[in-house]
Amino acid sequence: MKNKLILLFLLLAVCLFNFIGCAPEPYIQAPPQTFGVPGIYHKVEKGQTLWRISKIYNIELDELVRINKIPDATNIEINQMIFIPNREKELPIPIQSDNDDFIWPINGKIISTFGSTYHNLINKGINIEPDDKLDIIAAKSGKVVFEAENFGNYGKTVIIDHGDGFSTVYARCAKVLVKAGDSIQRGALIAKAGLAGRDRRTYLHFEIRKGALAQNPLFYLPR
């Protein structure tokens, strides 16, 4: 009986040590079911976007979203495993550097995600509440193709065409600092965030469009 108690004590001690004395492994999302499709898994690192991953592996972003079953209202996370179909080896993803990449148009907190319902409307972008500065910058280089002082609930709005099938929308601005026809460099100041319509909360409504189709900005913006 005494030996059994000692053995039980030792087992409890080992379990307790493992529980409080060992750091847990970093979280890695379980790979999605691939239904026999050949391919590899890419482990997401800091600063990588789904958009850049799709470019490096030369695969359509929509295909990556579909096969990995990524919800529209989410973004990819560090250590997440992304299945890349019909590829044989994992490729290095360089730190965001070229002018084809998107950057955040304003620093702040996301208060409404892509596809969510906001004021009984489906959000076609994301709403970002500024941290402190109200500066809105161009997420990518391009040409201003639309500027309006009062575009319904969007308020003061700017649209930039990036010349590659993509455009970005910046709405609810307090002040617009560019005009239609202006060529804009990525990171250039284009407007100030403000208020619009029935909502008295200050935020930027930001959209990325591919042709006429709204995209989830979180798939394109670095984290």
Image (cartoon, grey):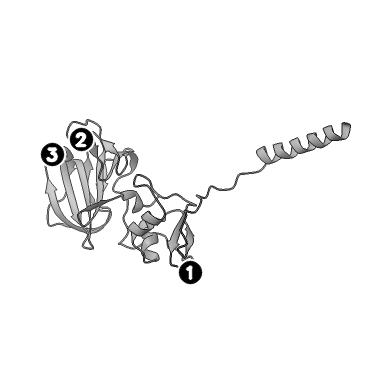
**Closer to the eye: label 3 or 2:** 3
In this rendered view, identify the residue nearer to me: 16 or 102.
16
Q: Position of residue 79 (x, y in %)?
A: 50, 52
- The answer to whether residue 205 of the structure is visible from this angle is yes
Quarter assignment of residue 142: bottom left
The answer to whether residue 49 is left or right of residue 8 is left
Q: Which residue is mark 1?
A: 88
> Do the residues under discs 3 and 2 have CB atoms within 8 angstroms?
no
Residue 71, compared with residue 36, is above or below; it is above
Q: Position of residue 149 (x, y in %)?
A: 11, 42
Q: Position of residue 40 (x, y in %)?
A: 48, 63
The answer to whether residue 85 is left or right of residue 173 is right
Callout 2: few (<14), some (14-19), or many (20+) C-alpha neighbours within 10 Å? Answer: many
Q: Which amino acid type is shown beneath numbered disc 1?
A: Glu
User: Outermost residue toward the bottom?
Assistant: 88
Q: Position of residue 66 (x, y in %)?
A: 37, 55
Q: Earlier in the sequence, mark 3 or mark 2?
A: 3
Q: Mark 2 falls on what kind of element?
A: loop
Q: Which residue is mark 3?
A: 152
